[in-house]
Amino acid sequence: MALDQKSAPNDLSAFWMPFTANRQFKKTPRMFVSADGMFYKTGDGREVLDGTAGLWCCNAGHNQPKIVEAIRQQAGELDYAPAFQMGHPKAFELATRLCDMAPEPFEHAFFTNSGSESVETALKIALAYHRARGEGSRTRLIGRERGYHGVNFGGISVGGIVNNRRHFGTLLAGVDHLPATHLPEKNAFTRGQPEHGAELAEDLERIVALHGAETIAAVIVEPMAGSTGVLLPPKGYLERLREICTKHGILLIFDEVITGFGRLGSSFAAEHFGVMPDLITCAKGLTNGVIPMGAVLATAEIHDAFMQGPEHMIELFHGYTYSGNPIASAAGLATLETYREQGLFERAAELAPYWEEGLHSLRGLPHVIDIRNMGLIGAVELSPIAGAPTKRAFQAFLDCYEKGVLIRTTGDIIAMSPPLIIEKPHIDQLFGTLADVLKTLE
Ligand code: PMP
């Protein structure tokens, strides 16, 4: 194939797209070619309201001048520096700023390039932590049904999404799962945290009794599950998980790849719910989604357990070529400054009641069987078409896109998580469009 033909924008065959029905997409492609503020622009010049902050990551909206400029400057100053046995100032600065922003016990940041890598890193830190303290028998990991922890082997093993697991062999050994916290028959249409379900945390005691606490390294959960449909923790659930983990010497990991950076109206969900894990994973909003970067936040207790051996020895045999990459670090610093200067986390908290009202006004429309929300995140669950699960919500996605609004679907659940710069008229546009679409769906 001639080069010009291969690189022509209408040749879509070479790019094997992730988490996409490739053959279907390539018949009727949807393309964004630019973005500013709350809006994407399509190849044919239409504006599309970003109701999802890209993939839950552009929390400060698009084309933020400070972030754009920081990347430009850094690229011209120091484009790359190795992070193994070498340093550059911005990675250290970003780690400090990130820990300043995080809840108090978090004093150290290990940089990765994505949420998936943050998860793998946190799981490995948990295992190595116990070993460093002479408790090498703690090797079991516990996740949760309907958990999403990225797509690498550790993450899909502790994760609870059948399609992400079933095609890939035996996965990690020694993994158990807590039950999902979603109880639709009891909690449907709850605003904020549901009343029922805290007792589901007791299942951890069952797993401890089955295997022995001395075999269990860590429990990993999303404090609020995002990708599997905005599943909120029942009141008291996270507190109980924390208690049981502490009682048995098990580490608690919060996967905050979605909930970090203001989504719930505070820096992290740990702060929002007032429950402190031992490790936090984050990514996405760390650089406003603009440059791939993630991090694992660790308490002094975890970190210091590694700092015991001879000084010339490497403490943790783990890292990535791009850990703390200079351009990503510059983007991260500019992003955290943007959040602070524009007061975006506070703004999310202030707008949350208006968001909640708008979202719950969809109750009673055709097919709507549940609505869930917290901060600036929300989900509308639809009844599936018999024999064709996911089809109805996906049609809603296509119809909204045609009407200039980007939503996201997972199964028959519509999820929305706009940039935190959103204004009330945008919220009206988002839910107004969705309401119109729901009225005409099959
Ligand atoms: N953990 C959670 C909770 C997530 O929501 C995601 C992505 N949606 C990931 C991990 C994986 O992140 P990434 O796609 O950056 O690898």
Image (tube, rainbow, N blue to C red):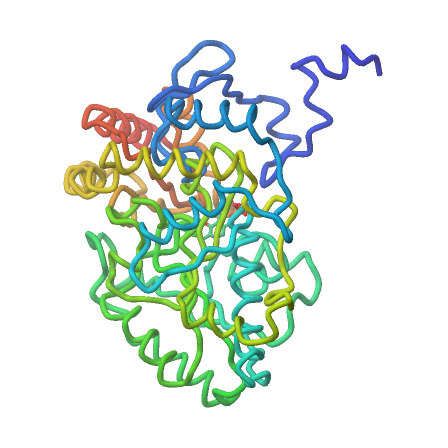
Rendering coords of residue 111 (x, y %): 52, 51
Residue at the spot 63% in from the left edge and 34% down from the top edge: 17
> As displayed, is residue 12 above or below residue 43?
below
For the C terminus, give its image quadrant: top left
63 sits to left or right of 141: left
Q: Give the residue at the far right of this rendering.
A: 1
Rendering coords of residue 25 (x, y %): 60, 28
Residue at the spot 84% in from the left edge and 16% down from the top edge: 1
In the foreground, 369 or 398: 398
> As displayed, is residue 436 above or below residue 301?
above
In the foreground, 291 or 11: 291
Tell me if I can see residue 373 in this picture.
no
Rendering coords of residue 440 (x, y %): 33, 28
313 sits to left or right of 109: right
Rendering coords of residue 5 (x, y %): 77, 12
Residue 315, image quadrant: bottom right
> As displayed, is residue 192 above or below residue 334?
below
Residue 76, image quadrant: top right
Residue at the spot 44% in from the left edge and 79% down from the top edge: 250
Residue at the spot 51% in from the left edge and 77% down from the top edge: 217
